[in-house]
Amino acid sequence: MQTFLSCDWGTSSFRLRLIDAPTQSVIAEMHTQQGISAIYDAWKTQQTISRFLFYSNYISAQIRELEQQANISLHKVPLIIAGMASSAIGMKELPYKKIPFVVQPQNLLVDIIEATASFPHKTILISGVSSSTDVMRGEETILAGCAINKSFNKQLFILPGTHSKHVLVENEMLADIKTYMTGELFQLLSTKSILAGSVEKNNMETEANDIFIKGVRDATASSVLNNIFQVRINTLFNAMGKNENYYYLSGLLIGEELKQLMEADVEAVTIVSSGNLLRLYQAAVSALDKKITTFVADADTALINAQTMLFNHYKQILYTCNQNL
């Protein structure tokens, strides 16, 4: 069986999957909230072993859980890691790959780490990407797994999240990156600011409603600094309930992020996400009333696709193992 371990290690979460490469199907998977930030803080409290070994020990423990799930040995199965593991607080810092370059997985900057007796998994560690003004780690792998439509000269890929990324692809070349702190700002405003008393947490598992769309459209009409205070006014004047305000604030911030599309010189937009977040961004783009071709892509599928292509590209190297391990 041609399998590999797919790891997506972000700042605040860790996901590990066992992938069957020929079919790109998930054999087993697990997810924790032990992101790079938490592991780095834990390592700093002890520092009796190297940072790389400390992180490797954590991965090993999660691999053992996958072994139990799949009821097979994963000894020597290669590992491919995307995300913040290659950052300054990761297991091994790698330099950023500079743009522009053709958006293909084999063009990403990687470091191939040899297996050892204590960690018998040859590892591909994927680095991030940088422009002259911005950076990303993790999203570049997801982007590389997306289908680039050759019919369009200029395409914008939107990857929503805590720090949403807008990535411009021109003639199949990764040309520009812009980061929007939409998710983090929403969290801060809804829990730590004066607006916290005006919103009530909502899982937002339903389709985007009229209140959300109103927030998106209001964001395009005036300053975000004035708009967000309206959330408090809505409560003071009984214009909206706290639950409605939660949607309204989300619409304001997502609308603020997306309103640059009104003037953007792009032929198509692809939203790369999943679940309710994908539906919200779709509704927000539609609410802008800009005539632009819009596609969607599943972020998990794109990640696995890119890592599978990397697995196939480096397969000969990955299976050249130290037989004494």
Image (cartoon, helix red, strand yellow):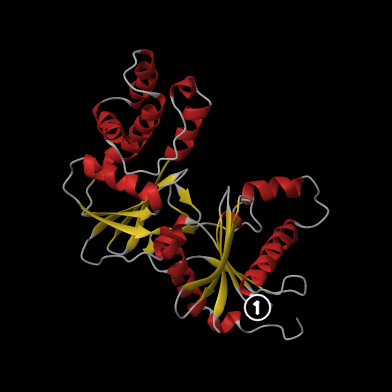
- Quadrant housing the C terminus: bottom right
Q: Quadrant of residue 212?
A: top left
Q: Is residue 320 left or right of residue 258?
A: right
Quarter occupied by residue 226: top left
- Under circle 1, the secondary element is loop
Q: Position of residue 78 (x, y in %)?
A: 61, 75
Q: Is residue 57 left or right of residue 189?
A: right
The residue shown at (39%, 54%) is 274
Q: Could you tell me residue 2's position as x and y percent? A: 54, 82
Q: Residue furthest bottom?
A: 323
Local packing at callout 1 (Cα closer than 10 Å; few below 14, some 14-19, many 20+) is few
The residue pinned by badge 1 equals 72
List the single residue furthest toward the top.
Answer: 237
**Where is residue 59 shown, x and y percent of the image?**
67, 62
Residue 286, given in percent of the width and then of the height, sits at 22, 44
Furthest toward the right, the residue is 48
Tell me if residue 241 can be seen: yes
Identify which residue, 169 or 244, lies in the foreground.
244
Give the vertical position of 69 relative to 287 (above or below). below
Taking 42 as reference, is 215 left or right? left
Kindly identify the amino acid type of the residue bearing the numbered disc 1: Ile
Identity of the residue drawn at 45% across and 34% down: 186
